[in-house]
Image: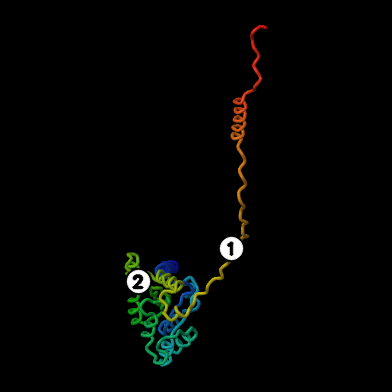
Amino acid sequence: MKIKRQKHAKKNISFYKFNFNFRQPFQILIDGTFCQAALKNKIQIKEQLPKYLMGEIQLCTTSCALKELESLKELYGAKLILQRFQVRRCPHFKDPVPASKCLLSMLEETNPHHYFVATQDHTVTTGLKKIPGVPLLYIILNTIVLDKPSQSSLDHVQAVQLGELVSPAQHQSIRSLKEEQGIGQKDGERRGRKRKRKQSNPNPLSCLKKKKKAGPTPPQKKTEQGEKKKRSRHKKRKTEGGDNTPAPSLSNP
């Protein structure tokens, strides 16, 4: 039975990791009703929750949940357990509200801080199932149980797959890209930031030595054909002038 419960928890945790970007350490928001049930069933929250969720955890609560237990003397033991956890700041610091209302306000509409919620309050669980991406923990039959994903979580995932919505992981990546590019900031912040000019290196072409100007080109040498032509002309002129000596006669004396 324990192995089956562990597989069930592993499957649900992987669903929230993949679709809603949950990461360790898991933040678990606890109220007084869960602490009272753990005290009654002799469950060590700090020891058993990390084993059940197979990872590091951070146990936390709100000041409204603590003040609600202070007014109920019969829940003194639950108050001692709840005091050991981190107290997260809620918007009702000056005017406390019931713990059920405070927990729902901490999750807002999309559970941006990725809280697990551990409670036995039926009012809280009903409100949590309307918010997508909220893992719910409760105690039943002396054991801690991670509830299966609500219908609103399943509908949200289906809408993301169909391209109708943007998943939390995609929304986070878009936000980080906007911050890098400076998109979405106030005009005053943009104007206040001045871009620093990078120190530019000198142009390497300007560092080269100037070349000396070339002088007048020397006269071209005469070609061999030209020399031959001149020599042939000279011989021709010599033959045209002729020699005055008479040619020898071929007749007998």
Percent x, y of residue 3: 45, 67
Residue 220 at least partly seen: yes
Disc 1 to disc 2: CB gap under 8 Å: no
| Side of 226 where 149 appears, left or right | left
- Picture layout, residue 222 above or below residue 186: above
Whole-number angstrom distance, CA of label 1 to CA of label 2: 66 Å
> Can residue 115 be seen by looking at this rendering?
no
Residue 223: percent from left, percent from top: 60, 37
Local SS, label 2: helix
Q: Residues within 10 Å of mark 1 (few under 14, many from 20)?
A: few
Mark 1: amino acid: Ser
> Going 35% across and 71% down the picture, which residue do you hit?
153
Residue 19, percent across and down?
39, 68
Pointer 1: what residue? 206
N-term mark: 1 or 2: 2
The type of colouring in the image is rainbow
Count of labels in the image: 2
* Frontmost residue, 96 versus 159: 159
Which residue sits at x=37%, y=82%? 104
Where does label 2 land, which residue?
Answer: 153
Q: Amino acid at mark 2?
A: Ser
Identify the residue at the far right of this view: 253
Q: Quadrant of residue 167?
A: bottom left
Q: Nearer the viewer, residue 118 or 158?
A: 158
Q: Please determine whether, in this image, residue 64 is positioned above or below residue 22.
A: below
Give the x, y percent position of residue 119. Answer: 39, 80
